[in-house]
Image (cartoon, coloured by chain):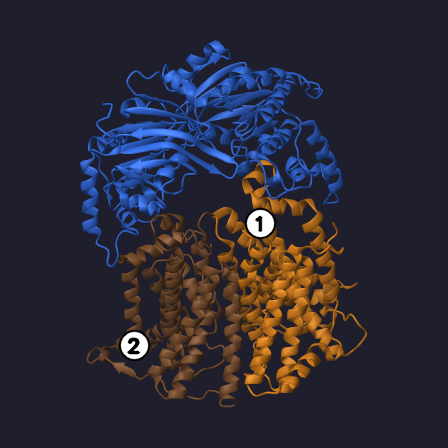
Chain colours: A blue, B orange, C brown
Amino acid sequence: MDGSTGSPLLSLQGLGKRFGTLQALEGIDLEVAAGSVLCLLGENGAGKSTLCNLIFGVYEPSAGTMTFDGAPWSPRSPAEALDRGIAMVHQHFSLVPRMTVVENLMLGQVSGMLKRHEFGARIRDIAESFGFTLDPDAVVGELSVGERQRAEIVKCLMRDPKLLVLDEPTAVLPPGEIGALLDICRRVADSGRAVIMVTHKLAEIARVADRVAVLRTGRKVADESMKGADMGALVHAMVGRELRPLDVALAEADDGAPPAAPAAEPRGFALVCDGLTVHDRHGAVRLDNFTLEIRPGEIVGLAGVEGNGQSELGMVLAGLQRPTEGRFYIGNAELTHAGAAAVTAAGGGIVPEDRHAVACVTALSVAENMYLNKLPQFTRWGLLQRRALNAAAAVQMKTFDVRAANPEVAFSGLSGGNQQKAVLARELTLDPLVALVAAQPTRGLDVSAVEAVYRQIRAAARRGVGVLLISSELDELIAVADRIAVLYRGRLVGERPAQPAERPAIGALMSGQGA
Amino acid sequence: MSDLALRLPDRRRLVGLAVPFVAVVGSMLVGLLLIAASGKSVPDAIEAFLDGAFGTSFAIGASINRAVALALVGLGFILAFRANLTNVGGEGQIAVGGIAATALGLWSPVADLPLGLAVLVPLLGGTLAGAFWGGIAGVMKVRFGTNEVISTLLLGFIALLMVYWCVQSTALLRQPQTSSATLPESLPVPGPVKLPGLTGDPESPLHIGLVICLVLALATAVVLQRSTFGLRLRAIGLNELAARRAGMPGGILLVVALALAGAFGGLAGAIMLQGEQYYLKTGFSSGYGFDGLVVGLLSRGSTLGVLAGALFFGFLRSGGISMEIMAGVPAALTLVIQGLIVIAVAGSVILVERLQGGR
Amino acid sequence: MEETLAIFIASTLRLGMPLMLAASGELVSERAGVLNLSLEGMMLTAAFFGALGSWATGNPYLGVACAIAASVVVSAAQAWLSVNLRANQLVVGIGFNILALGATTLLYRIIFGGLSREEIPGLPKLAVKGLSDLPFAGPAFFQQSVIVYAGLALIVLIWVVLNHTSFGLAVRAVGDEPRSADKAGIPVALTRWKAVLITGFMAGVAGAFISIADIHTFTENMTNGAGYLALAAVIFGGWNIGRTVAACLLFGAATALQFQLPAMGINVPTAFLLMLPYLLALLAVAGIVGRLEPPTSLTLPFQRGK
């Protein structure tokens, strides 16, 4: 099942792509054979989507060459790619929810009068030939995610492609539907086509992949046949960072914290999650009976590859989403249905995954963002005391090393690292602060920013704050946390002490083994 | 940081002002061309226009009064717009304001109130009525997710017809029908309810509405620029999730924003009634709601812009009426000019953006 | 009694006709994502230029052509501003309404001067043999001018196009998910343009109906809010053509009742009847009378990559 019969269908040589100063991909050599499935692994930002977009003609490469079906391949648009036999199923479907499946698939493909029956029959036939059913007259908006995905797949298959690229197809699927998708991929490959499946979920690929390639920060770090592949090594290849500078930084981030405020009497737990369950719009279970207790002063790491329920957990704990079942407490206060303001008032600091969506208002100034939840303190007679606000912000910025020209510049003008530090500053200076939930706090940050963030988090823990650190950076968790729980497919699958020796075991849990 | 202090002009602001200015001037030139094409004398028309706009103290007073109503609607608009809410129901909010003011003004206990309360109570009533009307759209947005453009528009039409209803029925606000020729209008409000004049000049109809408007304009500027409430409105308009996370009561802010817009409209209606018209009749709002909306939109959120735009359109209307009477050029021409200005400025936004630094 | 009913039916159709025509056209625009507040202005412009054309040439059919042409010009301007210049659709709509009112009034005064209410050549009524003699509804349904029959045929055509052709599919996609439509290769801007032009065309027919077929003259501000009523009908009809047409008839009936009910001795305030369409639309949009969802991208301009 190696698929290496003769020359490869698609071959990439030294492929590179640069966006301004960002080197998204560099020196990629890859081969895909007809009749085989290649799984492309990597974290967010590793360059997987960029690579697919290069193959599919959305971008043009900055370096290197591609060969497809025996001829040089340099597409200038997706339309060209489609014509030549490459089709792509995107992660974010481009379907129109209010129209039916057959209408969606006819969009842009037919002209004149619509012949729904005929087209619908074609859809049914194609689906059947790959082993699944699809109702052409179903309204897309009412379909489950898996069914929508299948509609997208049929949309691609109708073009009779030689190469089918799927971008994170399992990311949106509940466990029950993943098997079906993988079967389809296998059948597509068995029909003589090539399949590239981009993913960061590991357990499933064993069922379907012939080869596995791993990307990390734009480079290929692994490329092997599936036979005899070591899953743990793959995880490490995906998520590992340059260890040495980070270790040093983390070790040094242990002192120099601001003087601690007098610690409150530790009362029970800082954060308790009790059976939290979240169903998404289509009924798929994103978080499953999540139970965890964090004591004051404890740093608990929650490890897991992205997309295993972390976002949903973060939204629930921030008070922005109601769980389908379960409860959570910060200190003694139950906050399950209380809303975001109540969470803040109860001492819940949240540094969310996507700060732009939830934590900050980018058009406002740095000072305004840093004190967004403390405006009443700077209000007299209804008027905002800007001078006092800016002065206070300036002090905070110094303490937390937020670098900007002055507190009045727009928040959007700050670098990602400084934005994160600013949000952290705001959350860490909540009074009272009982629990801190930080989700992917160091994503996109350089080493010095990472150091600064962890220094602050450690200081907060020393003050008696209970910290939940949600991250897919296993090395960071091992260095900073006291114990590490692992989230897989929305469920807590295990807990280990945060020691380097536990890395393989934790990695296994993250990839869904040993659950 | 004061809104009233002069800011050093920079390229962006200059472009932002220059393009609408060109649009305005261009539209007026088209107007002049139309006058010439219709065979009327252009110099006569211009003279009549200027006379009607600025010529006598009556003209100036009337123009400013008009501007006051427009400005109030515009101010309400930019307040709601700060929270990213578009209030299209100004016409209806004026209408309910007028109804409330008339009803209160005609109710005998009110006219007997001392210390100027006879004037204030109906004004307040109109304001509250407008606030309620705007608030309905706010509640609909928060509870049902209804697009406020649609809801305020529909509420506007409903309110206009409510005026019609009120003046059709003697049980409501219609004056007693002494003969079949009695017009469907309300009785005029009694003297104590009418807005006192601002100047001693008996010729000038200028009333204290101007003072009210200027005070509110200042208040609006302060609220938008310097108050915490203004910042909250801005936050909720830009990123509702983040604002809620920061503890802001999202739903309440939205309802208050629309209620405020409505309140300003209601006040405008009350002022129009107590200041100049004195009795309620169908269509008394005569397009001021839409014009005020235009003033608000074109001002790009600036209080000064609202005042400037309101003055401009106010004088335009007065001049137009005079142009018709004295030079025989139909007042409809001012509508043409107004329409052209609106379209030209709206269409030039993309040009402004490109010139200001590209998107 | 029979006569009252017949009059009622005739009035309903008469008052509902321009609404149906304009609303069907506007429906196409809104399904494509463009809100034309300027519908009122388009209808008024059409009514005026139709009357003008008919009067100047003495031929009512040429008048209809003029009406449609004028309205299409206005809609083209609206399309250019909304789609190409991405201007605020609300402002542009209001601007056109003001402009249309001013321009038609101005031109009317200039051209017709003191000859107000001059009768213009109108469209004759055509009777459908046999059917026009049916009791109650006979004359109302089957003795109408050509424009009515043609208009109804156009409405049916719109229904067919919207639901059974690839263009209709493109329109619906562009109004809900322009990004997905773009990815599927649909030219978003062009589709919206075409949709707005269709609205202009239908508004032209509606305006022509008012001045040439119905009243045989032009008066200032003749449409008097019919455009807004049509917009309310689209909302109340849930952006579905069948329900929109029904809504227009309902609104026409409500307006007709304001004359009928007093004649029958029933005293419902006229204002309430006139208010009813807007009230119903408001309740519909609040989700109280059925769950209504406007096209997702209504009033939002489209730019690839944003």
- In three-dimensional space, the C-alpha distance between marks 2 and 1, rounded to whole angstroms, equals 48 Å
Q: Residues within 10 Å of mark 2 (few under 14, many from 20)?
A: many
Regarding residue C120, the answer to whether it shows in the image is no
Which three-letter amino acid code belongs to the residue tagged 2?
Ala
Q: Which mark is residue B306?
A: none
Q: Is residue A492 left or right of residue A333?
A: left
The chain containing the residue under callout 2 comes to: C
Which three-letter amino acid code belongs to the residue tagged 1?
Val
Residue A506 sits in quarter: top left
Q: Residues within 10 Å of mark 1 (few under 14, many from 20)?
A: many
Q: Is residue A307 left or right of residue B128?
A: left
Q: Secondary structure at mark 1?
A: helix
Residue A228, horizontal then vertical, whole percent:
30, 15
Write down the residue under mark 1. Answer: B255
Q: From this view, report whether residue A105 is shown above or below residue B103.
A: above
Instruction: Classify the position of the C terminus of chain A by image quarter.
Output: top left
Residue A322, horizontal then vertical, whole percent:
48, 33
Write down the residue under mark 2. Answer: C140
